[in-house]
Image (cartoon, rainbow, N blue to C red):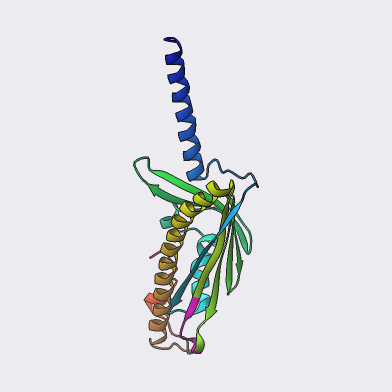
Amino acid sequence: MTRSIPRLLGYATVGAGVTAAAYVGLVTGACPIDLGIGRRMRPLGPQLVEMAAPREVVFDVIAEPYLGRTPRALADKLRVLERGSDMVLAAHFTPLGGRLGLVAQTVETVRFTRPERVDFRLVRGPVPHVVEAFVLSEQAGGAGSRLAYDGEIGADLWRAGQRWCELVARQWEQTVAASLATVKAEAERRASSQGDAGAGQPNTDGAVRDERGRGNRSWPP
């Protein structure tokens, strides 16, 4: 009996280590669980954001870090793995906080349909299923645009999957809301700069330009 105690403690330590490693792998997306059984789904959103900017400007703000050169300010948040003309495979990084400093990584396909839609589909992450969309529409009278976000998230293993879905979805929606706030600020800044340029002195062919409206394409602000 005395000899078995150290052995049991060893088993318990190994078991705890394996459980901790599995949890870290799950929350960071390094070891996702995709069994295809007992899947439970949950909606994401909707979130609606009104923007005082043309739809084309909002679309460009969203698309440029993916289809163009990724700004240095996003280097620790976004990495484009493969890039096509209207679709990319991208890795997104989200700090989870806490003492361990964990960072969740998701890999998604992002498809762009100019100027009205951006679709996201999860390839790898903390859950096996996520689809999302940004749908852009013009406001009446051309005063601005509206971005509508919605999607769905799913996890396996019945009730356990449903609980995990709820935990992940809350963080997911908070991250999306923060991203949309950044998009809104930058789109409205660009629209305002273009308006200021339009109020400047016209050149010989009727176009207007000033220093604030020339090639200012950084994002986020």
Q: Residue at x 53, y 52 (%)?
A: 162
Q: Nearer the viewer, residue 9 or 174?
A: 9
Relative placement, left or right, of 120 versus 209 is right
The picture places residue 80, in percent across and down from the top left corner, at: 55, 54
Position of the N terminus by quadrant: top left
**With respect to residue 22, does 211 lie above or below?**
below
Q: Residue at image x 62%, y 48%?
A: 38
Say whether residue 158 is left or right of residue 214: right
Residue 219 visible in rendering = no
Q: Is residue 127 above or below residue 173?
A: above
Magenta run includes residue 50: no
Let me know if residue 142 is in the magenta part.
yes
Q: Nearer the viewer, residue 153 or 4?
A: 4
Q: How many marks?
A: 0
In this view of the protein, which residue sits in the foreground, 35 or 112?
35
Q: Residue at 48% across / 90% down in the picture?
A: 206
Q: Is residue 52 visible?
A: yes
* Residues rendered magenta in the picture: 141-146
Instruction: Name the spot of residue 215 as percent of width and height, x first.
Output: 45, 71
Residue situated furthest front in the rendering: 1
Of 174 and 161, the residue lying toward us: 161
Q: Is residue 180 above or below residue 165?
A: below
Q: Residue placed farthest to the right in the image?
A: 36
Residue 163: percent from left, percent from top = 50, 50
User: Where in the figure is residue 55, as x and y percent of width and height?
Assistant: 52, 77
Q: Residue at x 60, y 66 (%)?
A: 112
Point out the image quarter for the C terminus.
bottom left
**97 lies above or below 195:** above
